[in-house]
Amino acid sequence: MSLVPAGRDLRLDFFRGLSLWFIFLDHVPSNAMAWLTVRNYGFSDASEIFVFISGYTAAFVYGRVMNERGFVVGAARILKRAWQIYVAFVFLFVFYVAEISYLATRFQNPLYTEETGFFEFLQKPEVILIEALKLRFLPANVDVLPLYIVLMTFFPLVLWPLLRWPNITLACSVAFYTLARVLDWNISLYPYDRHWFFNPFCWQLLFVIGGWCALGGVTQIEKFLKSRTVLVLSILFLLYAAALQLSWLIPGVTRKLPTWALVLPLNKSDLSLFRLFHFLALANIIIRFMPMDAAFLRSNLAKPLLLCGQNSLEIFCLSVFLSFSAHFFITEVSARLPVQMLVSFIGICIMVAVAALMTWYRDIDRRGGKPPPSSPKNLGEQIA
Amino acid sequence: MSIRCAAVALWLLAGLLPGAAENCSVSHELVATFAPLPHVHDDVVKNKKLNILVVSAAPTQVGAAAGLKSYPSFMETALKERLKNTEVSVFAFSVPRKPIDDVVAALPPLLKERKPDLVIWQTGTVEAIRAMDPDVYGEKLMAGVELIQAAKSDVILMNQQYSPRTDFMFDGAPYTDNMRYVAQARDIALFNRYEIMKYWAETGVFDLSGMRNDGLYEKLHKCLGGLLSDFIVRAGSLPGSLEQ
């Protein structure tokens, strides 16, 4: 299996793979293994990694298409991808509705009368299905997909100016984010007064920052990023975030802190600036200490993560499905710690195995298809 | 190597077996108290009275739960045992399945009428189900706590319970986070019901995944009531406290 298209930054695949593992572990409810994930040691979590890298790869891959073959072809490719993500969302929604419908008819433990209020949603199945198709009824844990759909659908309109005037486009994105935060923009959901968990008006900023970096933005500020001041500030900020996040969970520890230092809880829906800067600080340090040509990235140890990162859409959907299954297993069989560990480990093994299978399929498709078989461009597009 | 494999296998097997004995004690950190209960302390010590109000949005006495005893009454019994010579009264109030706005609206007349020393506020589930904006939730919670404190009552916040069957449908963590913040800002206690029940599930004390009425309700609520009464006695530095 060839994992290395020429010129591709393997760190992207590596960390996207890692974010998918984290998303899986975090999505199994009450999973003790979620302690291994980044969210416990700082402000940002796997969502930021996933959205940033998605923006980066989308701009990198479709930017080239748009430059070489024009706006229409580039936009068509992007919209095709958005459609694939929409189909994946509907697919996962079916599993989700099946599981809650099963529970709704059989779950009669008086201990949980309050929780079963959730099944009110099922009283009008026709409404739920239509609202879901309109992306106005979103199951928990799947909500990064609708964000991805919206970001990709409007990406042609962002990519075109991003290729010409990257800084102005980024400034517009920042302005849009600011307006959304100030004026409380979000997309409403059915029913009640609910809103999208990942507010697309806010999260677009991270996606555009990713795209801006991919199209050369980083080189403009490279000197700044590599300065000692930025390094020291980043490390201090990360340490502060880790200390606060960890001590926050232990009652009593943060009681003595002054209110200005106690910035938790942070608003994830609107991409709080603390989360954004935490992610950027983390990314800056990783890029600094893990060069693009690090030998580690080509070793066998990194391979499972690269495989997952290169098949991100499929593996994300699989991870949501696996987290449902893992949760089912934990509640049916045992909730005890060793079981949680075993189930988490098996889930990750399945993700890697399926990713390897997808890559293998792509390999045979390429060999059986038309030349040029080893064109890195084609491969790049498939894994955007 | 084979010994290690066998040990791992045994350990996994032990994880699958149900817990041997039912013991509601939890690890110490889970029920550690940091905020005092001055009004509770004063009323018990000076007037030999303890008046507690439990506020929630739980539809407790409906359907299969009708007629079952819940943690407020178990807590009352336990407190009466611990605090001899003290007149203990517990009143449970609920606005079933209504979000926090309705609970806060119901507070002023309720506080005026009951004049509690302590309000135990069980909250966060309905809001999680409805995916209410956690920031808005935090603001309302803060407003409610300020109302209660202005009425010269102590407050204990209680978060959602651990419900393994339904916890993939909605996420209570952002609401518990807001409770943590309000608890710190207003110097009040948070009784972490979620972590306590999760501890019981993970150590095999209770199997919380039952689909039907398996008699768990009263057993679990008895444990919660016992823990809460102990929590109040310790936080309020009351005469029955072992730490005294």
Image (cartoon, helix red, strand yellow):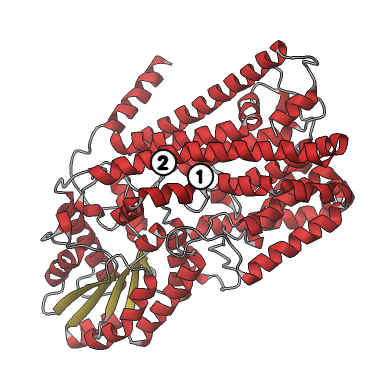
- Disc 2 marks which residue? A96
Query: At which x and y percent is residue B207?
Result: 24, 42
Q: Nearer the viewer, residue A307 or A379?
A: A379
Query: At which x and y percent is residue B133?
Result: 49, 64
Let me know if marks 2 and 1 both belong to one chain.
yes
Kindly indicate the quadrant of the structure image that contains residue A384: top right
Labels in figure, total: 2
Q: For mark 2, name the chain.
A: A
Residue at position x 51%, y 32% in the image: A318
At label 1, the amino acid type is Val
- The crowd level at tag 2 (other Cα within 10 Å; few <14, some 14-19, many 20+) is many
Left or right relative to B38: residue B64: left
Residue at position x 32%, y 58% in the image: B193
At label 2, the amino acid type is Tyr
- The crowd level at tag 1 (other Cα within 10 Å; few <14, some 14-19, many 20+) is some
Residue at position x 41%, y 31% in the image: A343
Q: Quadrant of the N terminus of chain A?
A: top right
Q: Residue furthest top?
A: A368
Kindly indicate the quadrant of the structure image that contains residue A55: top right
Q: Secondary structure at mark 1?
A: loop
Q: Secondary structure at mark 2?
A: helix
- Disc 1 marks which residue? A142
Query: At which x and y percent is residue A221?
Result: 86, 52
The reply to whether residue A228 is in sight is yes
Residue at position x 43%, y 60% in the image: A191
Q: For mark 1, name the chain.
A: A
